[in-house]
Amino acid sequence: MSPAQLQLFTVLDDQGTTVSELARRMGVTRQTAHQAVHGLIAAGLLEQTADPASARQRLIRRTVEAERTHRQACAVLEELEEQLATRIGQDAVQILRTTLETPWGPALPPDPAMSEPQK
């Protein structure tokens, strides 16, 4: 799974989202979003359905298999969080979650010093 495909799942609405809207939310071109969507359709994780609000547009949404996998992943994460809370406390877990969910803001430009060869 590509980074774009993984990111796509984080911006996909439960009721479905158009490719154009997915591209906007991901900050990528419509073509990049389209490629990610069609790769996931081929993998059986997404499907296209008619948009009841527009005869010209299609909605992208998770398949039954993707929903099942999502529920399993959430259950595993919940169990891990419970184990972590047992070790470091529920308050610390909540602080960690809040910190990790804080928006990073726009991407920074590459640091030229990081691309220089080491001597």
Image (spheres, rainbow, N blue to C red):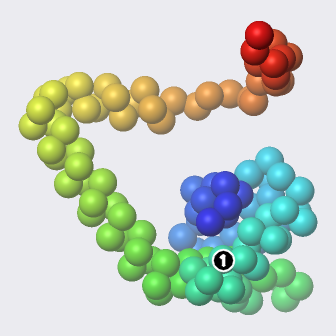
Quadrant of the image occupied by residue 16: bottom right
Q: Position of residue 31 (x, y in %)?
A: 90, 66
Identify the secondary structure beneath mark 1.
Answer: helix
Q: Is residue 19 above or below residue 77?
A: below
Q: Position of residue 22 (x, y in %)?
A: 74, 61
Q: Is residue 73 above or below residue 86?
A: below
- Identify the residue at horizontal 62%, vertical 83% (top origin): 43
Residue type at mark 1 is Leu
- Of 108 and 18, nearer the camera is 108
Q: Which residue is mark 1?
A: 40
Quadrant of the image occupied by residue 41: bottom right
User: Residue furthest toward the front?
Assistant: 119
Q: Position of residue 107 (x, y in %)?
A: 75, 30
Q: Is residue 21 visible?
A: no
Q: Position of residue 102 (x, y in %)?
A: 51, 30
Quadrant of the image occupied by residue 5: bottom right
Image quarter (top left, top right, bottom left or bottom right) of the C terminus: top right
- 66 relative position to 119: left or right: left
- 90 relative position to 45: left or right: left
**Total residue callouts:** 1
- Identify the residue at horizontal 83%, vertical 81% (top origin): 57
- Of 79 and 57, nearer the camera is 79
Q: Is residue 83 above or below residue 31?
A: above
- 69 relative position to 93: left or right: right
